[in-house]
Image (cartoon, coloured by chain):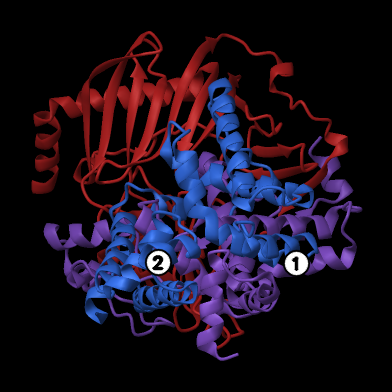
Amino acid sequence: MLLSVDTGDLGLVQRVQKGDKTAFDLLVLKYQHKVVKLVTRYLRDPSDAEDVAQEAFIKAYRALPQFRGDSAFYTWLYRIAINTAKNAIVSRDRSPIDFDLDMQNIEESNSMQMRLADPETPESLLQTEEIRVTVNEAIDALPEDLRTAIVLRELEGLSYEDIAQAMDCPVGTVRSRIFRAREAIDRRLSEVFEGGLGRAEESG
Amino acid sequence: MGAVTLLLFASVVQAGTVDAREWITRMNAALATRSYDGVFIHAMSGKRQTLRLIHRMENGRMAERLIFANGSGWEVVRNGSEWVAYFPDLKIARVETRNRSWGAMVTLNGLSEDSNRNYEISTAGTERLLGRTAQLVRVDPRDGFRYGYRFWLDQQTAMPLKTQRITRNGEVLEEISFLTLEMRTSIPDELLKPDVDPDTLKWLRPNIHVDKPSLKTGVAPRKELMPPGFRVAFNNPEAEAKGPRTRFIVSDGVNWVSVFIEPADKAQPPPGARPDGVVLMGLSATYVVRQEGYKVTAVGEVPPLTVKSIADAFQPE
Amino acid sequence: MNEQEQISQLSALFDNELPPAQSGMVIRRALKDPALRASWGHYALIGACIRGEPVHAGRLPDVAERVRARLAAEAEHEAASAPALAGYDTAERSRFARYGRGVLGGAIAAGVAIVSLVVVRNMSPLAAVPAVQLAQAGVPAAVTSQPQAQSAVSLVTPVQVAALDGAPPSYTTPVDNSPAAQRFGLPLANYVVAHSEVVASASLSTVMNANYDPTLGAVEMTKDEIGARR
């Protein structure tokens, strides 16, 4: 029985459809990395990826009232993101400008933040690297059964049931292992974020 | 005497510098006198925009029209000192004033002999741009207190086919590079009129209320505290005839910073609010420092530390 | 339900492995509790790291933050100006408009209100340059070691900045999380305008700023003023 494709996402989608727009934020938080990665494959200039990803989410948000749940939310979002990326290429070919500057396009990120976020600035490289190192170290430090569970889930995308079969344990145990793995890594991440990125060495 | 000799010596030795300066002088002159119509790409902070720039210099009067080519209908129209930005999609026009001698393109009118101390000004060969030969002229900052420029100047007209604003480390902050550029002997008025019907717009102007000062003592820059090379270039044209000066323009000849002196806010910031700090907007950095009885605000397209150092250099006289 | 169980359910919800019957309550809590929301974001980050996807430092703007800000801004814009937005009543729209301010923190509200302003939270690499240069070039100490005591807040002097040697120096102070930032934001924008009136180097870069807001700090002109310019 693999019918429960994305009950969690669906729950969030339904809340958005009912008018609780804050629920959309959780969907963006959850899928932003995947979408950025996805659109990067289509774009010539990777630095456009965040803009295109943002655009894709906005489009998805606008189209959400029409989403009927006949596919998984991410599949649906995936299609929108690919289309947005393709359109971005087309419009870029037509004219090198792709960023409409109207009021609809108010972005939180200011140009300086963009500069800071520019993948080429050493600072952002350092911070990104720091997050990656923190997460990887935390994963390495996990007991093996927790590590296997989270990797099967996140890297292989296996369902809890599949993981349970692979690890020969009950589904409840899988759920608990994944949760404990995340909790341990999350704790480490929170320390780094609270201590301030770049200060990990001092605090840790 | 010794210093003067040294400077002369320096300028003679750096033959390349003289050449580069001539190029910059030619560029300044071209931008100040020629009329042209071109399309350029403006790149800043990872964003690119294509714009058309129509610039007319006629009888000593400058008119300019900048059109965003992104379908938004945005335009900026300059007429002497009047600057009007049209946003038809928002049904807004915004009117500001500008220094009448400067258009959209950067000129370096403030270069002096002293500039060699803070910038390495050099020519760096030629490149082909737009099917023409362009002379590369570099104005490289010698320290991190200022931004520099690179100009690719058309060998024939000295028009900047490409302009970059750069940091000390050579990172490009802003680039203007022409895709087409046509020098014109005349430009009809119609080309300088906005496409949008002005009657359909809401007209806005900035509501600038920089407080009129009632300072007990004057506040002035302490030379030894200023970042190297920066000095008061001129006071506000409308500077107060009497009483302490409250507006200064500080420059090293290439980078420009405005300094505003005002009485300290009567209302203290609420607890926990920390208004002092560098705020960035586009390439401008703004820094506010509150001293006893007054506050100093420094704004400029310069590195953040520069506005801070300049603001901090202003002390009671 | 204890906290542990709550977070455990959040994790299962994240994986779409929580029975629908239990989802509702967890979602409601996640929307209310910033800690749960942060964990949710971290789960996504962890997955991204494992899969080698691009990750964003928490303080830098991520896509979620930008989408949030833009939706909030649009709602604000619509609530303020649109005659009617199909499908949403006014209360609904203003509720969404508040969404940026309330649930998701002042940073966004300030970002929307001020739009074009941002405060350097960490010293940028650009800002770090002068200090290093100072140290190397032996610029007169007077430039860098002026007394800071009179200043309303104590700031790290450039000399200290240089001495920090790699640690994230911060002579700038974050202000954009506070209501005060909004209070200070507008006047700051006015200084930039006043500056660009005299100095040309600001002209293009100001309008080109992707967040340029033509209404910022502006008032409507009177009929006389409009007439006078024609």
Residue drawn 25% across and 66% down? Answer: B224
Q: Residue C89 vs residue C148: left or right?
A: right
Please tell me the colour of chain B: red
Chain of the residue that carries numbered disc 2 in the rendered image: B
The residue wearing badge 2 is: B311
Image quadrant of residue B126? top left
Mark 2 crowdedness (10 Å alpha carbons): few <14, some 14-19, many ≥20:
many
Q: Which image quadrant: the C terminus of chain B?
A: bottom left
Residue B215 visible here: no
User: Does label 1 lie on the same chain as label 2?
Assistant: no
Q: Which residue is at a point 48% across and 33% down the rendered structure image?
A: A42
Q: Colour of chain C?
A: purple
Question: What residue is at 12 percent from the left and 47 percent from the top?
Answer: B3
Left or right, B50 with reference to B87: left
Left of C53 or right of it: where is C217? right
Between A39 and A203, which is closer to the camera in this rendering? Answer: A39
User: Which chain gets the blue colouring?
Assistant: A
Residue at the spot of label 1: A20
Query: Which of these two is toward me, C100 or B282?
Result: C100
- Give the foreground label among 2 and 1: 1
Seen at 57% across and 78% down, the residue is C34
Residue at the extreme bottom: C2
